[in-house]
Image (cartoon, rainbow, N blue to C red):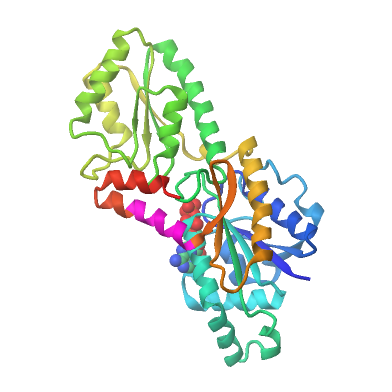
Amino acid sequence: KRRIAVMTSGGDAPGMNGAVRAVVRMSIAKGCEAYAIYEGYDGLVKGGDMIKEMKWTDVRGYLGEGGTLIGTARCAAFFERPGRLQAAKNMVLKGIDALVICGGDGSLTGADKFRAEWPGLLEELVKNGELSAEQISPFKHLNIVGLVGSIDNDMSSTDATIGCYSSLGRICESVDYIDATAFSHQRAFVIEVMGRHCGWLALMAGVSCGADFIFIPEKPPSENWRQEMAKIIGKHRKLGKRKTIVIVAEGAHDLNLEKITPAMVKDVLCNDLHLDTRITTLGHVQRGGQACAYDRMLSTLQGAEAVNAVLEATPDTPSPVISIIENKIVRKPLLEAVKLTQQVTEAIKAKDFERAMHLRDAE
Ligand code: ATP
């Protein structure tokens, strides 16, 4: 029986458990054996008990659970060849030659590198006497399939990453709570949201909550953003608005890439508009809690498709990442998706913001 393993890696995101459940159950439904690798690449490098067979009932209750029940980690050892050598040995010892990884672009880059090195790693293990030629002979190729798990929605080549809509929902709910108190006291709130280099969460939260002003890294405000923001918010107040909400992405900066912090925004609201202003950093509540319906659906459909992709792979098929584009679950070349995503960050660094916006949407 073919053995297919699933792993979660990088930052946790709601929906990762749904993906694990779907991969496990689809693998079993297709006549394969399913394995889970615990604690991300750490578990792959350590092997032994960290790589466990999963039966149908082992993933009962996984669908809506937040975080990742099989754990995740940042693993320094996997960046180095000796770590990957050990990982290859552990996989062969468990009889696994297919790996579905739910993680961010870093995790998926590492996985594809592992696949490229795989034949060389096995040869080295035989040469070192750690494995025999018979042991490696059934495992000529490694299949890698990526699922993008991240609250940031920062991956090009897909419209949504697993976790981003749960996080957006959590942010909206939190802003609603803040709205009530802001309205009561006629206060202004500057709310920092997650997303690292990506402004999707901030932008969509701003749209969904009717924010007065939004700061995102892909479209920095003009040099005189202070006056501009004060003018707009001043106008809103004159029109009778009792509350002010400004959303700042954690990666926000100005046209010169100087960071724009919530404290800088607060200064303008206090000093120029004389608003009683508070800062709220939403922090890790944005990552926690149940997966929303969309993420349960996305992780289930993508997890099932990942198993199909494993079973249909040939040695020449490039590693795929499972995406959703215009509401269809599709396979895209993993490395191209990662490259496009990295190009966004490069375009921002080069202050080519138009290109950054274009690449964010690229398929
Ligand atoms: P997130 O978007 O949440 O940060 P990520 O998958 O991008 O998720 P990383 O911390 O970049 O998170 O990567 C997770 C792990 O994947 C790393 O700790 C490392 O073990 C492995 N990894 C990342 N990049 C590489 C690489 N270039 N080569 C080998 N392994 C890598």
Residue 89 visible (yes or no) = yes
**Percent from the top left, x then y, of residue 6?**
65, 60
Quarter of the image containing the N terminus? bottom right
Give the image quarter of residue 233. Answer: top left
Magenta-drawn segment: 335-345
Question: Is residue 66 visible in this depiction of the protein?
Answer: no
- The residue under the point 69% across, 53% down is 304
Which quadrant holds residue 224? top left
Please state the horizontal and vertical placement of residue 185, each as a whole percent of the image.
40, 12
Q: Nearer the viewer, residue 311 or 73?
A: 311
| Observer-nearest of 352 and 72 | 352
Q: Is residue 351 above or below residue 314?
A: above
Q: Position of residue 316 (x, y in %)?
A: 56, 73
* Residue in the picture at 66% in, 54% down: 305
Q: How many marks?
A: 0
Of residues 266 and 31, which is closer to you in this image? Answer: 31
Residue depicted at x 25% and y 27%: 267
In the shown orientation, is residue 335 left or right of residue 44?
left
In magenta stretch: residue 195: no
Residue drawn at x 40%, y 44% is 198
Look at the image and say whether residue 339 sits in the magenta stretch.
yes
Q: Is residue 115 above or below residue 151?
A: below
Expressed as whole percent of the image width and height from the top left, the position of residue 31 reads: 80, 63
Left or right of 40? Residue 278 is: left
Magenta stretch: dominant secondary structure: helix
